[in-house]
Image: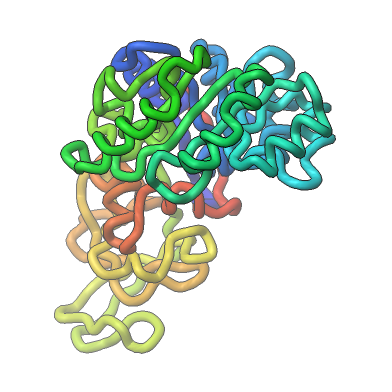
Amino acid sequence: MSKATLTIDLDALVANWRALDALSSCETGAVVKADAYGLGLASVAPALARAGVRKFFVALAHEGALLREVLGPGPTIVVFGGHMAGDTTLIRDHDLTPLLNSADQMLRHTEALPGHAFGIQLDSGMNRLGMEPGEWAAVRDIALAQKPVLIMSHLACANTPDHEMNARQLRVFREMTDGVGVKRSLAATGGTLLGNAFHFGLTRPGIGLYGGQPFSNAKPVVTLDLPVIQTREVAQGETVGYGNAWTAPRASRIATVAAGYGDGLCGALAPGLLLYAGETPCPVVGKVSMDLITADVTDLTEVPEFLRVLSVQQGIDKLGALAGTTGYEILTTLGHRYERIYKT
């Protein structure tokens, strides 16, 4: 193995979608924004389409255009960012469905593309995207007359099931949309797990498809193997890496592997990060540098050709916690120097 290898298990990803679909009381879509959370839109989206997904969600119109080229005609592609200035040609030519987030976007869309499908995003309390209750009340009748195909909102605290914000947003969303006669959506992964009251007509899981929390029953989707470039013997008291960050407490064998923060494995991971030789953990020592990581392999009887950093034992959420971030960020910042293998 000459390159670090990122293995993406498409069967596991599809199994996660099916499991979330089974928990849902309605249609289940799939969020594939940010290049399918960094795992490759061109491979992930067709696998989901073959499994039965008919509604896909992306962040921006240019992502939707790329997705349409991958999927071809048929599936609905919904754009969270709506109809921004300069998006008209992409939306029209690639048959995208923008979620209109404001009265200004509604005016832009209806003037530029009269009769073209659209949805509406409402702000039920997250204060990020969508029309607030007052704005929605002002344009509601006009909007509904244009026959939107979807009305949605987004939960701020769905990953914390008992958080009072969930019930509050559910109430506000119902107040804004009950009786509209349009398909509605409130639940991403966390909302799907909250139960039927949050499902409405469509759920749209994202991170749970890719093996992340809060879907604790998700199958792992990614493994990442890092090739060992060199091993060396380090005497007790010698140091390893930039800034003499680690001092050997005993005579040690150190393996250097080919990956680093240039590959999305950020420097903050170093304290507590483990690499795995099969089931055996090997602690990372010294600092993570741009292209290299050093690990203590003293206790191995034989140093393998590669050490694994993303594994069953150490998934994306554990890496995220070590880095002070989330599994989302670990996935979406994985670099493009990896050899990618798709398992089906």
**On the rendered structure, is 306 left or right of 61?**
left
Q: Relative to 191, is 212 above or below? A: below
Looking at the picture, tell me which residue is in the foreground, 124 or 295: 124
Determine the residue positioned at 49% across, 21% down.
29
Do we see residue 123 in this rendering? yes
Determine the residue positioned at 47% across, 25% down.
10
Q: Relative to 237, is 96 above or below? A: above
Give residue 149's quadrant in the image: top right
Colour scheme in use: rainbow
Give residue 177's quadrant in the image: top left
Looking at the picture, tell me which residue is in the foreground, 257 or 9: 9
Residue 73 percent coordinates (x, y): 73, 15
Determine the residue positioned at 32% across, 76% down.
286
Q: Relative to 33, is 327 above or below? A: below
Residue 260 percent coordinates (x, y): 47, 64
Looking at the picture, tell me which residue is in the foreground, 197 or 37: 197
**On the rendered structure, is 269 left or right of 184?**
left
Residue 178 percent coordinates (x, y): 41, 20
Do we see residue 41 in this rendering? no
Q: Relative to 107, is 92 above or below? A: above
Residue 230 percent coordinates (x, y): 43, 66
In this figure, what is the number of numbered marks? Answer: 0
Determine the residue positioned at 45% across, 34% down.
153
Looking at the picture, tell me which residue is in the foreground, 312 or 235: 312
